[in-house]
Each structure stands twice: as structure tokens, then as C-alpha cells.
Image: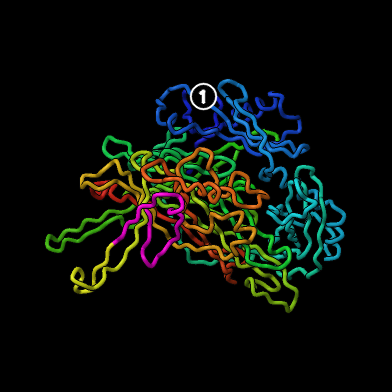
Amino acid sequence: MAPHRDEADPARTNAERHPLDPLSGEEIRQAAGILRRDGRTGAALRFVSVSLHEPPKSAIASVRPGQVFAREAFIVALEPGEHVTYEAVVSLTAGSVVSLRPVPGVRAPVTLGEYAECERLVRADQDFRDGLKRRGINDPDQVLVEAWGIGSFTMEEDAGRRLVWALCFYRGSPRDNPYAKPIHGLHAVVDLDDMTVVRVDDAGVVPLPPGTGDYTTARTAPRGGLKPLEIRQPAGVSFQVDGWEVRWQNWRFRLGFNAREGLVLHTIGYEDGRRLRPVIHRASVAELVVPYGDPRPFQGWRNAFDIGEYGIGILTNSLERGCDCLGEITYFDVELADDQGEPYPIRNAICLHEEDHGILWKHVDAGLGETEVRRSRRLVVSFIITAGNYEYAIYWYFYQDASIELEIKLTGIVLTSALAPGVASGYGTVVAPQTLAAYHQHFFSVRLDMAVDGNSNSVYEVQTEPVPVGPENPYGNAFRPRRTLLRTESQAQRLIDPLTARHWLVVNPGVANALGQPVGYRLVPHGNVLPFAHEESSVIRRGAFMTRHLWVTPFAAGERFPAGEYPNQHPGGAGLPEWTKADRPIENTDIVLWYTLGSHHIPRPEDWPVMPVERIGFTLQPFGFFDVNPSLDVPG
């Protein structure tokens, strides 16, 4: 059973909406029309994104039910003929353009329309077709052309152009896995503004690998022995949904969605008695970078900034097509804008459901002969994206003990390149004959705009150390945590250290629990890794946030993305490294945590032809936020 929430109803009035509700389809169309009629942009205007212009925190905190408020859209658009990117704020309430400014020297992200047109252009190009024929491929329509961000690998004569370069794969039959037949050495460079093929490079012919890479049930007969597993909630779900607000087991928060970040969580708070206590103002995955480790010609260009160069909102799956969620599901549709500013829906983009999660707590009192045990249930908010060959499933979990967990599951198909017969490589795993899966990594930057019992927060690094043997530790068994207050941005650029149980504690110095301790939440890392690319490499210059697991900055409305607002073709240095040069104070103030998650992938033969899920994540746990275990009231 899958109840469906369609909140894009244009009949909803301003008073029925909340200031953080995503734009409806009608609002997207209205915003695009207002900008077009303004007259300061041309008829060829191409829309990159039309999303909610989020109000400031102060405005959100003062909102009351039924209140009328200004509703605004934030638009990124470009004039391709003039090679100009624009940012606009449009008032839907007043029907006017509040601000419009060109952003000089940047390259806007790639739109879905441009991605599709790039494939058509490359397939039609005669030099590309000649390159295919040299490889025995006579039908260009059987070639998958993927537009990849070219990064800083441009020629001097390309200055000022908005470019992508193409990776190509061959489908031997309509249902073949194209990544089983990577086309080696043939690449096109395309100007997305002019929509022209700039050049075609051919580094030489390598035969196509022989396999099909079929991963469907047609490959092998399904195994037997699995009996049905049913998850039923005959009395219904335990959460309540009001528009885009969700309430469950003392948790309250709002869902948001935009083209760049996909799912956004707003105003996360916990109802403690009669008080709604804030924990996080806004949470999202703000960047995703995939560095590949193969240094061969062209292979070394393969570095994807999936959020900054494209946007994971536009890559989001419609979850009705598979068993992405199990149980009693509530889905949310979202609306995004195409290149012309027209809205289009993604049905079932967000999945909301409950899961059993084993034991919450238990104790056996042998003296009394009594056992107390509670089952843990968690609320799951998720969405899944497909970025070319890879799938990323992003799950936010809310627990009854007031913990929050982010888990990202990585699956899909490893990116391949072709090897000539008898040739080996030290930079990847051979996963099928003549098929190399390069060593690579995935880095996610999670932006957490913290609000632990208010906006005045401080961050401590906590790690455990042994006490030296002596009068204070005569038996040599003592150890204790050491807290270090991170006072400035430079002090808060930190790495994990699992051997010392290092974690980070966000406290509100002005609020104490019943024991006199400052209330807080701690960020506990799970597995993680650092990048292995050289510090002067293109991918590290452009995505320097990857070099630290933790960054802390004072809140600033314009600081939203760790690699900068426009990482597409940016030479590097933008975002976190640029902002933190000021070394601003971060003590007892409104702060943002940026946590970097790294997945290290040395592909296995077992990752082919489709990869079993790998998991990364972290946990946020209350530490002194409550006086006692907040889950004591969970029924047995």
C-alpha cells in the first residue's frame, strides 16, 4: 500500500502554504513568465533551475498558521548567445522581479535538455561517425553518449566557452548493458551554449570488450527458496503528514526539494514535553565528487561533480518503478523546471516510511526475574538518484532515542574502460575480459545548519586519551575524553581519528540540562577515507573540501555549496577554502557543520555487472540534550 501526497496543487492558497514549501508547478511557470516579461533578458533565455528562494531564519521562526507571507523564487538562467549566466529573485506575491544580476566568469550547470541535445549532436557529427566506423560500429544510434563536465581540462583557445566532453559506450543489442562495451579513445568536445561539436579526439582504436554485461533476470534463472516476507501495519502508519511537515515520535520537521540538492530537511526539532526544541535548521547533501585514479590519456579527465555540474534533484528517480521502499509508504511528488521554464513532475520522488530496527534497549533483572525490552523503530526519509552509471540512495533515519543518522547506499554499474587484448593496468580491476573498472572514490559534503536549542552554538572536538601511570592512575587502567573547543574556522578543519574515538560535540553554552551540563548533540563518524589525488591535482583544487572531514563556518546566507556556487569549469579554490581564509570566530554563534563522507572503491569482480550496495554515513546523537534516556516511554 502506498499513500500518495501530491502537494503541487495550484489551488493551495498562500495562507495554506508554509514559507519553506517547495514551489508548485504553477509557481514555477509563473516565476519563469515573470522573468521573461521583465524585458531585461532575451527570448533565447535558457532556464537552469527555478526553486524556492528560502526566507531568512528570522522570518521562518515568526511564521504563524494562516499567516500571509511573501513567496519568492530563485532562478538560475543563461543567455547562451551572450555566454552570460543570470541569477534572479522573483516575487510570486507581487508578480515582479526583485533582483536580476549577471554572474560574470562562471559556467552554469548542465541541464537535462542540454545533456540530451549533446548526445544527438555527437551522434550526428561526421568525424565522430568516422571514428565509430574505424571501430566497426555503423549505427551511431547504438552508442550511448554521456556529457561529462570537462573541469579545467580545456585548451587555451576554449577560453570563455561552456564545454562538456563525451564518454561513449556501445549497445550491441537494444537491451545490452552499454558499460560492458566502453568505446576507447573516441571523445567529442561540445559547446553547450552554441550547441556545436568543437572537435573530436581519437586516441586510437582498441577493440570493444566481448561481453554483454547483462545483469537482468534473463542472465540466470532466479534462485529458489525465498518465502514471502510481508510488512504490514494494519492500524496504519505512526507518522502524520500535513502538507510538507512530518511528525513522528516527538520529531517534527519539514521536507523540501530543489534541482541542485534534491531532498532538503528543514526545521528539525524534538518535542520534549510541551517544548519543541530545535536541533538542525537545515540539512542537505551539498556536493558529490567522484575522483577517478586512472592516469591514462583522457581517463585522467574523469572527475564528476554531480551536484555542482548537474544537480542531483534533476537526477532523482521516480520510486514507483521498483522495490525501493518496503512497507506502508507515503510518497511525495516534486516539480522542477525544464530548460524553457516549464514545470515537469517527478512522481514519488521522496519516500517516507517506518522500519523495525531491532532492539532499542533491554535489561534482565535476574533478582526480580523480570525483563524489560523495547523494540526500536525508525522513520525513513529517502530519495534515489541515477548519475549515469551510478545510483546513490540517500536515507535520513530518525530514531526514538532522538538520534539522527544519514546513510548513503552506493550501487549501480562501475565505470569501465576498454583494454586491448593481453594488456594489463595497475589502476583498476579487470571485472570482465578486456574490461577495466578504475580505482575511484566518492566524496559527499553534508551541510548541517545547526540549531541545538537555539542558534548560539559551539563545537568541541572530543577524543579519548590514556592517563599516564602514576599517583592518579596507579593501576594503569584509566582513560578519559579530552574536549577541545574549536574557536575559529582554521581550528575547525579536522580529520577523523577512529583510534582515539574522535567525534565532535555541538553544544549550546547558554542552555543547561538538569545536571548543569550544556545541552548538545554529537556527530559520530562511521567509516571514512581521504582522497589520494595530489593536492595540486585539478580535482583537489576544485573540490578542496574533500581534504578535511569536518569544517565549521559561521552561518552566512550566501555560503551554500562547499566547492562554490558554480564549480562547472572552475579552476578551483572556491567555497570552503575561500570562505575560511578569514578565519572567522565560530564560538557561541550561529554555525554550520560541513561533514565530508568518503567511499573508497577498489572494484571487485563481484561488483560486475551490477554492484551490490556499499554504505557510508554518520550519526547525530543527543549528548546532554536530555536529562535521561528519552526513549523510556516507548511502549513494550
Q: Position of residue 587 (x, y in %)?
A: 38, 45
Residue 103 falls in image quadrant: top right
Position of 39 compared to 507: left or right?
A: right
How many marks the image carries: the answer is: 1
Q: Is residue 176 above or below residue 47?
A: below
Q: Residue furthest front?
A: 582
- The residue furthest bottom is 422
In the image, residue 29 lies in the stretch drawn in magenta: no
Residue at screen point 53% across, 26% down: 71
Residue that appears at 75% across and 61% down? 170
Can I make out residue 460 in this image? yes
Quarter of the view holding residue 608:
bottom right
Q: Residue 272: horizontal and vertical position, in percent?
A: 28, 40
Which of 457/143 is in front?
A: 457
Q: Residue 501 in magenta?
A: yes
- Give the residues in magenta: 481-504
Q: 301 left or right of 617?
A: right
Rendered image quadrant of residue 372? bottom left
The vertical placement of 95 against 256, above or below, is: above
Structural crowding at the residue carrying mark 1, measured as other residues with C-alpha within 10 Å and reported as few (<14), some (14–19) or many (≥20):
few
Residue occupying the point 60% across, 21% down: 95
Query: Given the image, on which type of amino acid does mark 1 rest?
Result: Ala
Q: What residue sits right under mark 1 in the picture? A: 70
